[in-house]
Image: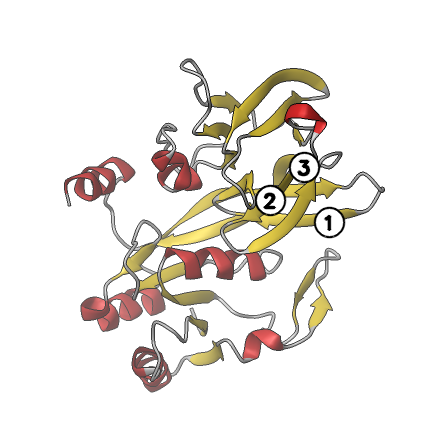
Amino acid sequence: MKHFLIYTNEHKDQDRTVTKRICQYLEGKGQRVTMRTGESRQAGRRMSADGQEVPEDIPGDVDCMLVLGGDGTVLRAARETKALHIPIIGVKLGTLGYMTEIEPEYLEEALDRLIAGDYAQESRMMLKGKAVFADGRTEEGWALNDIVISRVGSLQIIKFRIYVNGQFLHEYNADGVIVTTPTGSTGYNLSAGGPLVEPKARLIMLTPICPHTLNQRSIIFSPEDVIEIEIPEGREDRIQTVEANFDGSHVIPLRTGDRVRVTESGQITEFIKLNRVSFLEVLQRKMTD
């Protein structure tokens, strides 16, 4: 590797101590460094070779993106750079660490291994969600973890109609619905009682949030399936208002008559792996912390 992008969560590294430490170390080893923080994320966009919008301030020859923060920062970085196909590795500055591999005390050792090419890569699937509004408008979003459709406002249950490949599957009465990737199985899906999945797998899961029934479980679909979640009228023909939340960041408001179509995205996220620890070993350690 010769060119590194440092993607910093400025709230986790407020005085940029870790950012500067990485930059100085890499430049001392003869590497090129580009830094990206909150200010630089306000830059404009350009079109990539395959017609996707990408940040105009990120050079096209970046070999690796070092993401400084927690799992939420990794998710944001993956979405913002999805069309650039830059391999990602996280430096743990947050509280959650399923996606952040490098501990700050081992930073220089990890950087040396990256420079030397002593690492493996792991591909993760992403989801694409397309909101189709009753008036014909559309809006898209992408997620590495999950797309969560949940109620807004009062504590009333929401009615959801689920279609798969155009065929009606089921109607849920619940607080919400989670559509997740294997990577996202350890997130909100897990808290809602969904299954844990090896992150390199290719599948789509749907998990209801607090369903108002005793026999509702998660459903696992093929990555080729098209899942549609329709927002119908609620009890007594009332208008329902919900929101679709992409990786806890990008939010699309929805109401009765709208729907969200979820498919596997054509984009993937590449993670750099330094540790030879398996997913099951990491999971066992996290579950006993």
Relative vertical location of residue 232 with respect to residue 121 in this rendering, above or below:
above
The residue depicted at 81 percent of the width and 38 percent of the height is: 134
Q: Which mark is residue 244?
A: 2
Residue wearing tag 1: 139
Residue lying at the far right of the rendered structure: 136
Q: Quadrant for residue 10, please give it.
A: bottom left
Determine if residue 122 is in view.
Answer: yes
Q: Nearer the viewer, residue 76 or 24?
A: 76
Q: Amino acid at mark 2?
A: Ala
Residue 214: x %, y % from top left: 40, 15
The residue depicted at 50 percent of the width and 35 percent of the height is: 178
CB under 8 Å between discs 2 and 3:
yes
Residue 88: x %, y % from top left: 43, 59
Q: CA distance from mark 1 to mark 2?
A: 11 Å
Crowd rating for badge 3 (residues with CA inside 10 Å; few <14, some 14–19, many 20+): many
Q: Which mark is residue 261?
A: none
Does residue 255 appear left or right of residue 178 in this picture? right
Q: How many marks?
A: 3
Q: Amino acid at mark 3?
A: Val
Residue 174: x %, y % from top left: 51, 28
Residue 49: x %, y % from top left: 72, 60
Disc 2 is placed on an element classified as: strand
CB under 8 Å between discs 3 and 1:
no
The residue depicted at 44 percent of the width and 32 percent of the height is: 201
Looking at the figure, which quarter contains the N terminus? bottom left
Q: Which mark is residue 260?
A: 3
Disc 1 is placed on an element classified as: strand
